[in-house]
Image (spheres, rainbow, N blue to C red):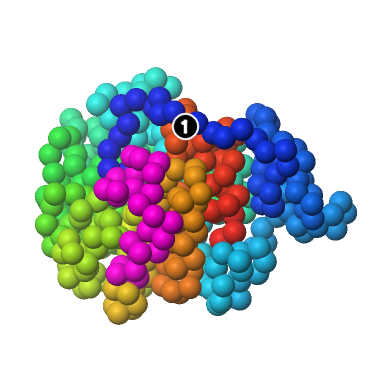
């Protein structure tokens, strides 16, 4: 997102539960207080301890949860009513597991007071739904203390915290995106040295080079920096990663202007990133997209039910024109009918295009409280509606 939240007390008024739950809606789970009765023609199926869902069928005949996606398929029921025609399923689909970047004004900060790592139970919940990808934001200043700078030694305690959650995810077969969530700013100053940035990434990727399920997300949402400068820094990071011996992992690069999809062709990114190169040919362009009026993700109100597909259209065409792959690293919005339709439209257009390899919801994480985009189980504001209606159909 564009900024850290100083307060997490964002309220969301949820409607009272209906007498019965529509197909693909939640009907049970730890902490759930709504109806456990499904509409006629569907049955409440337990996915895991945190989540049960109404799925088509009757007792003993209902189909179970999402299947492992293949490459290009014709959209199966139920998502054929949302997204018809031939679709390329996402290789990576999941959530941002936020927390280790919290308390950014307190460096190094105290674990459990200023910041936290994702909860293994949250990872288990989403993997039980069929999700396979988790972005782990962290702070460069905690990883590389300002006293010794970007080229100095890592803080071993913080590094081990990152390794612990990464190994938990990848040990279960998932993908872990490691994300320095700094907006291309380190210790209060914009990063400008391609040499230092390359060295930092060479050193960090060296710690993960033997884990093929790690994805290197070079830098979160650079802004107020020329696109050509950002592209140079991203290229330096790619070079550093590959020189460390990390040759099999996917690398994600981000652009300036908060790496917004809707501004990709007007911010200078579309010109600057046509020449980005990876010697191992395993790179994708990461963009972010929110659906409120200013694209910041700070309002639960969407511009329209079609705004998702509309804001991605130009970026999708650019990816096609330049034979590049896209990755939507952040999308999020409110839990209401217009916004659910907008998310469905965005994800549908991405899968129909064949050029987007992944998408992640913003955000999960144990400290979001009642933040309107929280999908942290069991009771995050986005769990009951966004999860089954806007995300699960695209697994």
Estimate the x, y position of residue 107 in percent, counting from the top left.
26, 26
One can see residue 300 in this view: yes
In this rendering, position of residue 147 left or right of residue 214:
left
The quadrant in which residue 320 appears is bottom left
Q: Is residue 62 above or below residue 321?
A: above
Quadrant of the drawing holding the N terminus: top left
Question: Which residues, given as a range, are shown in magenta?
Answer: 292-316
Helix, strand or loop at label 1? It is loop
Residue 101 relative to residue 118: left or right = left
Q: Which secondary structure dominates the residues rendered in magenta?
A: loop
Query: What residue is at 38 percent from the left and 37 percent from the top?
Result: 159
Give the residue number, with chain letter if any, for mark 1: 12
Query: Would you say residue 171 is visible in this rendering?
Result: no
Identify whether 110 is placed above or below 276: above
> Badge 1: how crowded within 10 Å, few (<14), some, or many (20+)?
some
Horizontal and vertical percent position of residue 213: 49, 56
* Rendered location of residue 151, percent (x, y): 20, 43
Question: In front here: 50 or 197?
Answer: 50
Residue plotted at (42% across, 38% down): 98
- Residue 125 image-quadrant placement: top right
Identity of the residue furthest to the right in this view: 60
Frontmost residue, 124 versus 6: 6
Task: Tell me the residue at 19%/42% (across/down).
Answer: 185
42 vs 74: above or below? above
Relative horizontal placement of residue 190, taking residue 320 as reference (left or right): left
Task: Say if the magenta span includes residue 307.
Answer: yes
Q: Nearer the viewer, residue 2 or 232?
A: 2
Occupied quadrant, residue 58:
bottom right
Q: Name the residue: 28% across, 56% down.
A: 260
Image location of residue 73, percent across then percent down? 60, 75
């Amino acid at each position: 997102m564009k900024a850290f939240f100083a307060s997490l007390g964002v309220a969301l008024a949820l409607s009272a539960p209906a007498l019965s739950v529509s197909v693909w809606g939640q009907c049970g789970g730890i902490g759930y207080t709504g109806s456990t009765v499904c509409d006629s023609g569907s049955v409440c199926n337990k996915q895991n301890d945190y989540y049960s869902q109404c799925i088509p069928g009757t007792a003993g005949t209902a189909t179970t949860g999402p299947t492992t996606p293949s490459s290009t398929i014709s959209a199966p029921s139920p998502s054929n009513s949302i997204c018809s025609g031939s679709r390329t399923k996402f290789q990576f689909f999941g959530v941002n597991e936020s927390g280790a970047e919290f308390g950014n004004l307190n460096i190094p900060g105290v674990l459990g007071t200023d910041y936290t790592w994702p909860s293994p139970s949250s990872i288990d919940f989403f993997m039980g739904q069929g999700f396979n990808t988790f972005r782990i934001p962290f702070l460069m200043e905690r990883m590389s203390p300002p006293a010794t700078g970007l080229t100095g030694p890592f803080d071993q305690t913080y590094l081990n915290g990152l390794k612990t959650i990464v190994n938990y995810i990848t040990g279960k077969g998932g993908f872990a995106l490691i994300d320095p969530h700094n907006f291309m700013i380190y210790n209060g100053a914009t990063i400008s040295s391609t040499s230092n940035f390359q060295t930092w990434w060479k050193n960090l990727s060296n710690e993960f080079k033997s884990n093929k399920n790690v994805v290197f997300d070079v830098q979160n949402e650079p802004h107020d920096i020329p696109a050509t400068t950002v592209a140079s820094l991203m290229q330096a990071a790619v070079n550093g990663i590959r020189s460390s011996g990390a040759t099999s992992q996917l690398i994600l690069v981000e652009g300036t202007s908060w790496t917004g999809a809707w501004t990709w062709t007007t911010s200078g990114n579309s010109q600057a990133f046509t020449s980005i190169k990876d010697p191992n040919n395993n790179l994708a362009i990461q963009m972010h997209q929110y659906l409120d009026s200013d694209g910041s993700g700070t309002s639960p109100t969407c511009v329209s039910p079609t705004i998702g597909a509309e804001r991605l259209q130009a970026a999708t065409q650019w990816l096609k024109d330049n034979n590049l792959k896209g990755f939507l690293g952040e999308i999020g919005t409110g839990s209401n009918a217009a916004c659910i339709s907008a998310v469905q439209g965005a994800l549908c257009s991405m899968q129909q295009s064949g050029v987007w390899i992944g998408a992640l919801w913003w955000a999960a994480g144990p400290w979001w409280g009642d933040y309107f985009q929280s999908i942290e189980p069991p009771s995050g504001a986005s769990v009951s509606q966004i999860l089954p209606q806007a995300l699960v159909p695209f697994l």
